[in-house]
Amino acid sequence: MYHAMDTEAGLVVAALSGGVDSATAAALLVEQGHRVVGMTMRLYDARGTAASSGGRCCGPRDVEDARAVCAHLGIPFYVIDLAPEFAAAVVDDFVEAYLAGETPNPCVKCNQHIKFSPLLERARAIGADILVTGHYAKIVDADGDWQLRRGADAGKDQSYFLFSMPAAELPAVRFPLGGMTKDEVRAHAVRLGLPNAVKPESQEICFVPDGDYAGFVSAQALKRGRAMPTAGSIVGPDGAVLGQHQGAHNFTIGQHRGLGNLTTKEKLYVTSVDPVRAEVRVGPKASAERTTMAIRDLRWLSAPRASLTATVQVRHRGTPIPASVTIDGTTAHVILAEPTVAAPGQAAVIYDADRVLAGGWLV
């Protein structure tokens, strides 16, 4: 269900990715009578890649789609060049994490460094009070206690990716689609005649549109003069060599497909990745799971506390697991009620029911 935004808001900036969700959010505000300005981010140079011809979040084609939406709505449109910031905060982090044997989440880093503070700074520069995006999540004002909550559509909920947004900026951000399903959003887009109403969704990381993460990391390592990931052994739980690989950056903990031609028919999972030794260890699924973990660089979207009982989610599609959590500075020590696969570098988010309390990155 779409809930109208408060009518006291003055000028509103709609962050447009080029996709149907952000376009619909902007269109609904225009329909409601708000003064809306569209802004989109130019994040990377995709010339000569699949991203230049297909729809990818904030890619070149998407900038033009966002421009077409603003022309259709009759609102001003600005393009903000954040390519240097994006490269430093998101792309570099992605590459370095994979080279270190971790499993990064670039969307979380983008929300932390790119999508909110820089856009809000520019929004305020033109006199806007509110930044609106097309995220499937809710921001709730509970008597001055601003909260980030899950979206109504469980299949589209994006709160997991949003824990890293600046807590101080919650009062200045709105998610008009938080109470809606994807089908409802599509229906509004068609009803409002948006030029991208039937545009398909992008499922891949925006700067790796072909989905070949390992190939991207290898190319970036070569481009930066870094040592290329080296070939090595895939080793079983007893230390026996079961196969060979072309670089540890091709693997992540919990992976059980794409292990190559191993000398066993047993279904095995990656249990550890050691890029220094170029060694990938595999074993039964239980060996890739854990019930205790540490979350580093903890970021709070609620009042910090020393300990709590909550649920913890370690993957976008992962099931929240009941847990006890104790805090030591910026590190959370977690004991889960049941085991799960969790890889270093992954985002881990702490919830109280549907409210995001805090989050960080797994050690």
Image (cartoon, rainbow, N blue to C red):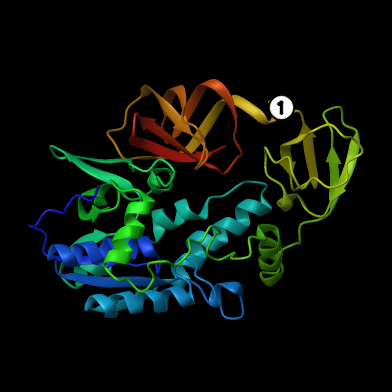
Residue drawn at (40%, 55%) of the image: 111
Residue 322 in the image, given as x and y percentages of width and height: 45, 22
User: Is 10 displayed left or right of 305 in the figure?
Assistant: left
Residue 36 lies in what quarter of the image? bottom left
Q: Within 10 angstroms of label 1, few (less than 14), some, or many (20 or more) residues?
A: some
Q: How many marks?
A: 1
Q: In which quarter of the image is the C terminus?
A: top right
Q: Quadrant of residue 176?
A: bottom left
Amino acid under label 1? Ser
Where residue 268 sits in the image (x, y, percent)? 78, 34
Asked if one can make out residue 110 in the rendered structure from this viewpoint, the answer is yes
Residue 133 appears in the picture as rendered: no
Secondary structure at badge 1 equals: helix
Residue under numbered circle 1: 287
Camera-side residue: 328 or 246?
A: 246
Direction from residue 59 to residue 27 in the image, left or right: left
Residue 284 placement (x, y as % from top left): 76, 28
